[in-house]
Image (spheres, grey):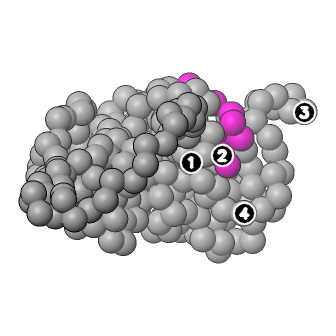
Amino acid sequence: MMRTIIKLCPPLLLFCLVLSCAPTGIYHTVKPGQTLYRIAMTYDVDENRLARINHIKDPAQLKVNQKVFIPGVTQLRNVPATVASPSTARAPAQTTSSRASTAKPPAKAAQKPSAAKPAAPQADLSSKPAKGIFIWPAQGKILNKFGSQSQKVYKGIEIGVPKGTKVVAAAPGKVIYSGNAIPGYGNLVIVEHSDSFFSVYGYNHKNLVQMHDFVGQGDEIALSGVPPNGQSARLHFEIRKGKSAVNPILYLP
């Protein structure tokens, strides 16, 4: 049934159909006292799965304000802290004898409090452009840039790489399409991310993932190939916000 729909739909309409059927996921921002185990329990997701998708080697080393991708959910949840932060724990009261034996240092003149340094901004997919959230799916010369060129409109960029080069996921997410039924893209992989972002990988020699697979940032998802029209080997890469193509360069490091 799905293949019949694919054959009858024009490419653009089919692309929009795929994106409109996409599942969801969100980014949870780690707060003080939260652990990967508690986050997984709150969102009802396997802890090991979260660690794999987000490339977390040591779950005990989560950092405050770190972004953790939670697949398959649509809303943020309140994750309780596991324990109080060690820095907030009260020191034990001193005994009278210990206080007496400890000489008080002379009082120092009050110093002006130093100006607090502003916290480093945290990258977020909801900001536009969210530069640095995505990574390069492959390294190579950009053969065609985003936008209109030589009477042709490019909805992404084309990266020149040898055939068989490993293509990696630009951000963590869920594979919503893996196939070759959309004309003009050859073997194609589409990954859905948080905040209605999608990444698109075309001209693949071989897709290494299937629909409904969850992938982490940097996971291998395909081997690069050549365009259907027989040009030199390259990777076609797009970033979309909803159904609209955006310039990938603005979102890459």
* Image position of 250 (left or right of 16): right
- Per the image, the residue denoted by label 1 is 134
Instruction: Provide the residue span drawn in magenta.
Output: 244-253
Mark 2 or 3: the one toward you: 2
Mark 2 or 4: the one toward you: 2
Badge 2 or badge 4: first in the primary sequence: 4
Mark 3 nearby-residue class (10 Å; few <14, some 14–19, many ≥20):
few
- Residue type at mark 3 is Ser
Asked which secondary structure carries label 3, the reply is loop
Residue 173 position, x and y percent, is 39, 49
Residue 56 position, x and y percent, is 36, 65
**Can residue 176 be seen in this snapshot?**
no
Badge 2 or badge 3: first in the primary sequence: 3
- Per the image, the residue denoted by label 4 is 139
Mark 1 nearby-residue class (10 Å; few <14, some 14–19, many ≥20):
many
- Per the image, the residue denoted by label 2 is 252
Q: Residue at x 18, y 59 (%)?
A: 100
**Do the numbered discs 2 and 4 sit on residues whose CB atoms are within 8 Å?**
no
**Do the numbered discs 1 and 2 sit on residues whose CB atoms are within 8 Å?**
yes
Badge 1 or badge 2: first in the primary sequence: 1
- Residue type at mark 4 is Gln
